[in-house]
């Protein structure tokens, strides 16, 4: 599997999309410094860690879109271009091929997130110094960890859709639709179907609501009293398992034209 993952990264490296995204995020982080310095001088920035934490939301948005795009293309393009035949004629199981692609998507997402976070810390250190105020390094790591769950979930959903549809545009559009309208969808479900809301995985992706630190939970409270941090996490992980099982079953049965 390691050889397959290496080959997937070589393909990703050749397309340069990951490096372009890192450049765009770095530019946006620099622009954030300029805005704070010149247009919002009253905004108190206590150091590089606070600056990096405030950029996590930006990084999460772009990393999720990148992961969704990558997951939608990694399967469908192989079938559209016919290169899937070259993979299947080798003595490797289909499941191994599928999971090598999935692991590549996850590793690429982690690489983008960690690199962008370190870049934000460096930019923040240059612009605001190395002081540590309300936001500590532990809070930064916890905030980063809370954001990783939804970042990884949506590309996993896309992987299932990519095994259903033959063109990459449909998995991409469908997943992006739910990603960008997640808040609206949650509001509709909570208002008109409160009884089933607790069984909708989107309501459990933001585990920061269980944190006692007000900086992390941002004043939000858990919606369901019968759920705890652990049970919500297990609920989401169960969805990961189900999605991967469905992806495997679909990929095993998919015809190669």
Image: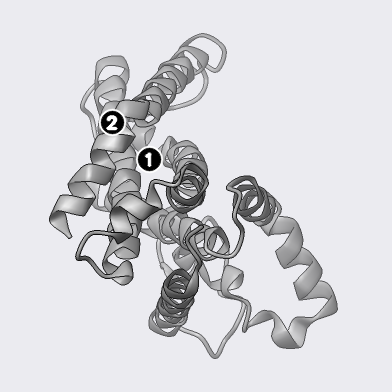
Residue in view at x 54 percent, y 58 percent: 162
Determine whether 106 is above or below 108 in the image. below
Label 1 Cα crowd, 10 Å radius (few <14 / some 14-19 / many 20+)? many
Which residue lies most toward the top here?
38
Q: Position of residue 121 (x, y in %)?
A: 27, 30
Label 1 or label 2, whichever lies nearer to me, is 2
Read off the residue under disc 1. Answer: 53
Residue drawn at 52 percent across, 46 percent down: 80
| Label 2 Cα neighbours within 10 Å, binned few <14 / some 14-19 / many ≥20 | few
Residue 169's disc number: none
Query: From what the image shows, is residue 73 above or below residue 191?
Result: above
Question: In the image, is residue 206 above or below residue 41?
Answer: below
Q: Is there any visible trace of residue 27 in the rendered image?
A: yes
Q: Residue at x 57, y 12 (%)?
A: 39
Q: Which residue is mark 2?
A: 13
Q: Tell how many labels.
A: 2
Residue 135 is at least partly visible in this image = no
State the residue at coordinates (25%, 33%).
118
Sequence-first disc among 1 and 2: 2
Q: Nearer the viewer, residue 238 or 130?
A: 238
Residue nearest the observer in this picture, 256 or 166? 256
Q: Secondary structure at mark 2?
A: helix
**Where is residue 115 shown, x and y percent of the image?**
27, 34
Q: CA distance from mark 1 to mark 2?
A: 28 Å
Quadrant of the frame with the N terminus: bottom left
178 in relation to 198, above or below: above
Relative to residue 138, is residue 191 drawn left or right? Answer: right
């Amino acid at each position: 599997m390691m050889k397959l993952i290496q080959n997937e990264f070589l393909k990703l490296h050749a397309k340069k999309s990951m490096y372009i995204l890192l450049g765009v995020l770095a530019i946006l982080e620099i622009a954030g410094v300029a805005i704070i310095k010149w247009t919002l001088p009253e905004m108190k920035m206590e150091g590089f860690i606070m600056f990096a934490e405030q950029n996590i939301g930006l990084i999460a948005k772009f990393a999720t879109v990148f992961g969704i795009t990558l997951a939608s293309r990694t399967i469908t393009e192989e079938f559209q271009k016919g290169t899937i035949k070259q993979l299947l004629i080798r003595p490797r199981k289909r499941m191994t091929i599928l999971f090598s692609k999935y692991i590549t998507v996850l590793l690429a997402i982690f690489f983008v997130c960690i690199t962008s976070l370190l870049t934000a810390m460096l930019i923040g250190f240059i612009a605001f110094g190395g002081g540590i105020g309300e936001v500590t390094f532990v809070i930064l790591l916890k905030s980063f960890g809370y954001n990783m769950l939804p970042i990884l979930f949506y590309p996993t959903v896309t992987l299932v859709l990519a095994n259903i549809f033959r063109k990459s545009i449909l998995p991409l559009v469908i997943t992006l639709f739910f990603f960008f309208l997640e808040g609206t969808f949650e509001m509709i479900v909570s208002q008109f179907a409160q009884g089933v809301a607790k069984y909708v995985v989107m309501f459990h992706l933001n585990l920061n609501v269980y944190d006692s630190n007000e900086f992390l939970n941002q004043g939000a409270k858990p919606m369901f009293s019968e759920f705890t941090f652990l049970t919500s996490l297990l609920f989401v992980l169960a969805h990961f398992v189900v999605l991967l099982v469905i992806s495997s079953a679909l990929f095993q049965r998919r015809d190669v034209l």
